[in-house]
Amino acid sequence: MKIGRNDPCPCGSGLKYKKCCMQAQQQSQENLKELYYKRYKIRLKEEEEDIQGIRRAGDLVVQTLDLVQEVIRPGVSTEYINGLVHDFTVQNGAVPAPLGYNGFPKSVCISVNEVICHGIPGEYELGEGDIVNVDVTSRLGGYYADASRTFQVGEVGEDASRIVDVAYHSLMQGLDQVRPGNTVGDIGWAIQRFAEKEGCSVVREMVGHGVGFEFHEPPQVPHFGKKGHGIILVPGMVFTVEPMINLGGRELRVLEDNWTAVTRDGSLSAQFEKTVAVRANGCEVLTPWQ
Ligand code: MF3
Ligand code: CO
Ligand code: CO
């Protein structure tokens, strides 16, 4: 239930909410904003304007992933998917954030099979049994949202289906920890515990990240860690959770192109990503793909 500005204050003072505890709450949120910026360089987001803006960008990212899902089948090239994502993003008044980001040459990251992340779209045609992560980041109205899913191409084998499943549930275990008072470490702890219990491994080199005003902001959100460690989650934090889970060892190797990260042992890798906001009552997913 939401208290209106002109409603009687729930503290029982008889004053309007806006003349009473609403001010105290705004004051404490202001202090928190300053504190989190000073201490961690984290820019907390305002409920109304900022989170709404990221939510709009997030809706577009979800629509884009849904569009991609429609065309995933054997024979489709990753370059074709790049074009689709690029055109759809631009048609909707947004900018594909990967394009030119630290020199990245394409509008979306597409990572097939043993590619962990940052795959560059190209000639490669998807084949029956492949698993393919498509990672979309859009900037709309000045706000960024970032999400990815791993799709299955036609009928996939047991190993492929398993790693996709474990990666998906790893993300869900992490998101379960997102609420005020928990810590960044709780998220990584839950993901690592689950993935390793399933006999899989968690990539360490790439992490979740603050997002919204920029593509990548503080804090870093590792997908491994210790319960109770790290920064305390507070309302207004917006970040991604995006565990990369390998069927074999966690070690990676970056290809000659200086982007494509692959598993060192050649085992399959899968990833799912969402952008979330910490809210007073828990967690709001700002890229609510199904
Ligand atoms: N979207 C990736 C992430 O989840 C980052 C890609 S950086 C790029 O953080 F330059 F490759 F686009
Ligand atoms: Co991300
Ligand atoms: Co991403």
Image (cartoon, helix red, strand yellow):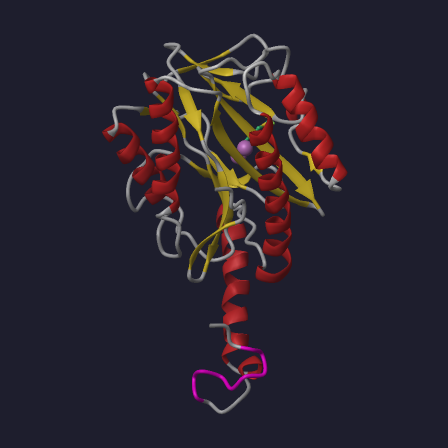
Q: Residue at x 30, y 47 (%)?
A: 228
Quarter of the rendering containing residue 100: top right
Residues shaded magenta: 4-12
Q: Nearer the viewer, residue 64 or 232?
A: 64
Q: Residue at x 64, y 29 (%)?
A: 98
Residue 156 highlighted magenta (yes or no): no
Q: So how many labels did they put on this image?
A: 0
Q: Position of residue 158 (x, y in %)?
A: 33, 19
Quarter of the rendering containing residue 105: top right
Say left or right for 265 vs 31. left
Q: Looking at the image, can residue 75 be seen?
A: yes
Q: Nearer the viewer, residue 86 or 252?
A: 86
The quadrant of the rendered image in which ligand 1 is seen is top right
Q: Position of residue 95 (x, y in %)?
A: 71, 36
Q: Residue at x 53, y 89 (%)?
A: 15
Q: Which residue ends up furthest to the bottom in the rendered image? A: 14
Q: Residue at x 49, y 40 (%)?
A: 274
Q: Position of residue 269 (x, y in %)?
A: 41, 21
Q: Nearer the viewer, residue 136 or 151?
A: 151
